[in-house]
Structures are given as C-alpha cells and as structure tokens.
Amino acid sequence: MREVIDAIKKGKRFLITAHVNLEGDALGSQLAMKELLLGMGKDAFILDSDPIPEHYRFLPKAGEVSDKFDKAGVFDAAIVLDCPTLNRTGKVGDVIKAGAVPIINIDHHISNEKFGDVNWVEPNASSAGEMVFRLFKEAGVEMTKEVALSLYIAILTDTGSFNYDNTSSVTHEIAGELLGYGLDPALVSESVYERRSVKDINLLGLVLATIRVNKDGTIASLEVTKDMLDKTGADLAKSEGLINFARSIDGVKVAVLFKEDRKGCNKINISFRSKGNGNVIDVNKMASIFGGGGHTKASGCVITGSLKDVKKKVLSKIEEVLKNQ
Amino acid sequence: MREVIDAIKKGKRFLITAHVNLEGDALGSQLAMKELLLGMGKDAFILDSDPIPEHYRFLPKAGEVSDKFDKAGVFDAAIVLDCPTLNRTGKVGDVIKAGAVPIINIDHHISNEKFGDVNWVEPNASSAGEMVFRLFKEAGVEMTKEVALSLYIAILTDTGSFNYDNTSSVTHEIAGELLGYGLDPALVSESVYERRSVKDINLLGLVLATIRVNKDGTIASLEVTKDMLDKTGADLAKSEGLINFARSIDGVKVAVLFKEDRKGCNKINISFRSKGNGNVIDVNKMASIFGGGGHTKASGCVITGSLKDVKKKVLSKIEEVLKNQ
C-alpha cells in the first residue's frame, strides 16, 4: 500500500480504469480513487471500455466515468482497479500500453496476475472499494459523504449485502465507519437493488415456471428460452440473479440455468452454482467437462445444440457426478 | 441496562419469552439470553406461544425453545424480548400474569408500551439481538461461538442483511465482532435464506404473472388467489417477501399485494409498501382508510368482498392519494 502512495506522489495526471461490465465495486472504487487523487493535489480522469450502466447513474459524480477514448490525453501513470489481468480492462488496456507509463495494479482477486509495475493485491479484502478506503486512511485524505457513498456501494454490492464469504470483521468495521458519514442504508439499498423493470419481473415469472428438481431434490434447473426473451423484451444482461432462485431451494446441491441465445444460433449458455457445508460439489470441474470454467461454487460453459439435447446431456452428467461423490 | 442486570441478580430462575410468529430476532435473542443467564449462574427456560419454525431448527440449541406450557414450573421473573406489548407474547402472557412476578421488558420498538417492572427500550438498536449483545458486555459474560451465531442471525434477519434503516454504525461494529468468533457469513446466509421449497417457487412464478403497473408506473400490484394456493400447496406464511417484487420496480412509489383467503371466506388481505426519498407516500394512513394500519412504509388491512371489487376500490383510492400529493 505504501508503494501505491509513493507511486502516486511521483505522477501528476493519472488514468483510472477498471474491468469491462462495470458493476458497483468497479464504479465505486474508481469514483473514490479519483477523489483521493484530487485530495492529494493530483489530476485524474476515469476511462472505461464500457459505458456506465443506466441503474448506476445515481452514483455521486457518475458523469466522471467516461468511455470517450479521444479525450484521454496524456497521463503519467495508470491505476487499474478490480482487475485480475490487464485484459479485463478491455480496450483501455491498449490505451495504457500505448501510453507506456507505469501501471499501478490494485485488486482483491486471488487470481491476480500482478501485471503492474506496482502490485497491491489483497485477497482478504472484500472489494476494491475496501482497499481504496484504506488508501484514504494511509494518505491522510479526508473523506466526504459522497466518497463514503461510493465506497459503501462498492462494498455492499461486492459482498451481496454482507452475505458472501468475502465479508470479514474488517468489512463490517469499514461499513460502519462509512455509514457514519450520514448515509441512509435503506435509501442506498433502494437505489441499488430496487431497479427492476416490469419486463424483468415478467421474465422472472416465466423462468420460474420452468423449474425442475430431480428425484432426491439435489439438482434444480431453470431455463431461459429465446421465446421468453422475445415475448418480454427483458434485458438478458439483468438475468444474472435468476439461477439463485434454483440455488435457494432447501436441499439443492447444484443449480443449473440453461439460456438459449437471443439470436437463435443454437448455442446454449449454461451457469452452474453449488452450495453446502463441507463436501460441496465443485462446479468448476463440472463446467470444465464441457469446456467451461469458473470457481468451486459458480461456473459456466457454452454448448452447441438444441435446448432439449443439451439439458439432457448436462443434467445426466450432474446426476453421475453426484452419485460418485 | 444496569437495572436489567440488577433485576437478574435478584432472581434464581427465569422465564424467557418473545412474540408470536417467531422469527430470527425473537429466536436468536432468546437463545442468547438463556446463555447469558446461565453464564451469570442463574437457571432459565424459554417458553413461547408458537413452536419454532422448521427453517430455524438449525439454530444452536434450538431444542431449548419450547411451547410446552405444562413444563414451565415456578420462576422468579419473566424476561420479555422484542415485544412492544405483553399481548404480543400470546398465551405466554397469561402464564406471566398468573406467576405475578416482576417483568423485565427488553425491546427496540419505538411503540413499546413499557409494560414491565423494568423497561429497557432502545429504539436506536437494530434488534433485540443487538441489545442482548450489549448485556453480555455489561455483565462481563464471555460469549461462545454459538451465542455469537444466535446474535448474528438476530441482527442479520432484523436488518434485512443490513439493508433496512435500523442498520447503524454500531450494528456493523457488532456484526464485525460477532463474525470474529469464527462465523462463516456465507454459510449462515445459506442456512437462513436458502430454504425455499419448490412449492414456494411455483407460487412466486404464478404471483409474478399477475403483476400490473398503472399508467405512470408509480403503483404496482400483485395478487395471490385461493386457486394458486390450492394448486401449489405453498405455505402462505412464507409469502411475506412477495410484495417486495412489486416494490423493487424502478419508479414505483406504492406496491400493493392482494391475498385471497385460503378458506375462501371472501376476505381480502392487503399489504402496502412505499418507497422513495423525501415525500414518501404514508401507507399507514392509506391502510387506516380501510380500517388497517402499520408504519409509514409498510402497512396492511383486511377488506371483505370479491378480489375484483376490492382491487378496483383500493387501486383507485391509491391513484387518488398520489394525485393529491
């Protein structure tokens, strides 16, 4: 962390970026990072490969997040947040390489490839937001209520409201301190989580009607068909949480979601989730059987074929793995 | 709080109780309270009017929660947790009155009627669990990992995973300290929240298909019919979260859920929820128009009539209130 502060002291103007598919932690940590740099008397700009999603436009100074590459200009160093590899920054990675400047890599993923000139990787931190919080303390820069809000949202979203296993005692301590800046947790929660559209609800209803559980109640599956997407007009990007409804059934060890392609190109996108204490099914291994991958409890793969055939193949494979466990 | 400790010191055997419809805070705070009393060299037993719900049987020493009135025996004082009135304890209230012993009232509801001989009411506490945590500190009794788990679940559930407005900096500090006893937040979360049945999911799917939003997107309604309950066999007691799907739609100011009676007795049970910053619709007032009540952001009422007529009446009333706002 000290090296990060030292590297910042050396430069004047900084490019700040994060990964593609911007979410709460990427956005909150970047916005707070910019304020930290300004507080240290530096100049900084945020450049991302993707635009800020509509439902995060309420973030303080959200307008600072830009995907306008022509306005990047010259910079002395690049600060990359929440990215295990430089590739994850998308096209911004090319801008950084072209700039040939030092890279400051700040991340909490255990898989981080230490691609920076300065690498500060904390796998025990819940989020990049938690790390930027610590930078404010280390640099002795005062936090505003706006910065506190950005960091709180980074932590809230990356820990699934303090429910994921990356939540630690330190995470709660920091969240408590951030609320102390006058944040209203209920209003923040509304702003972040209560952003569904009627289309999303319609899609959810149709998807839930497809739920199937195997005989002993250990495997639950759901499906999203092209027809459902056409009928509801729902945004597939927002379908991320659908599989949790299958996972949330008591007794389920593996949940699977089958998604037909919107374009109808005969490719089935499959997500796996597992749960349990002790002998959890490793769905990373399971996905890798079909050429995919991920983590022990969350993974995915893509298989070419009809929904019916792919379902049959994948579900019987899961049965087999569970039987041999 | 000091008076509570003094009152405990005076007695030998204590009855511990909480409200009917036991949930996480009632259960967690009672189980921890019993351990506190044992730690202070006292004897105690938990007596509740309702049995412990199936999905909370995983709580440490859950078997201590009893609804067997004949085993109450003699006690020197009664400790009532999480109840604004003695009535909320259900039939246990009669046992306490018959015992003619001092009542120690420990609660965090602002509406608490101070019905005890000792009254410790903290409207700023997130939960009764948070108050029992403070009692452990005050009494200097060591907490075990099991006690920490009970208290953590009390706080987690009563704050909606730290999302409700009763969450404070202190709440997070305490949650952080409790995790320090070696709790795994992800496993706790699974145990508490991932307990749906396939029936619940089926009901949810049917209910979501009924969603209707008014022209300007400010009122969203859902319905649960007798037919859906019969068809799915779902437990109506678990339908509490259904209205949140209506509330979670972007732009909605008032969400309403209409529930037909399972017995088909022509009574419609109605729940209201509101959201927003500043000029939130007061659904307590709205429910009171129909003889019901509750809080500003959550209320309910019961109206006799057909689902169709009741819906029409209530929805047009809400339109009227919103127009005059």
Image (cartoon, coloured by chain):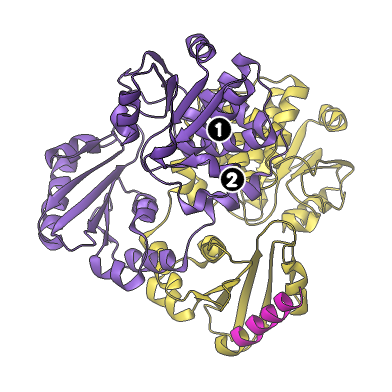
Chain colours: A yellow, B purple
Choose between B97 and A61: the one closer to the eye.
B97
- The residue shown at (75%, 37%) is A14
Q: Amino acid at mark 1?
A: Leu
The label shown at residue A225 is none
Choose between A95 and A58: the one closer to the eye.
A58
- Residue A54 lies, with reference to residue B61, above or below; the image says below
Q: Position of residue B37 (x, y in %)?
A: 57, 23
Chain letter for the residue marked with disc 2 in the picture: A
The quadrant of the picture occupied by the N terminus of chain A is top right
Q: Quadrant of residue A300?
A: bottom right
Is residue A266 shown left or right of residue B244? right
Is residue B323 shown left or right of residue A7? left
- Residue A143 lies, with reference to residue A4, above or below; the image says above
Q: For residue B163, say whether it is visible.
A: no
Q: Secondary structure at mark 1?
A: helix
Q: Position of residue B204 (x, y in %)?
A: 38, 63
The magenta span reads: A311-325
Q: Amino acid at mark 2?
A: Thr
User: Which badge, 1 or 2, is on the more N-terminal residue?
Assistant: 1
Establish whether labels 1 and 2 are both on one chain. Answer: yes
Name the residue tied to disc 2: A157
The label shown at residue A149 is 1
Q: For residue B103, say whether it is visible.
A: yes
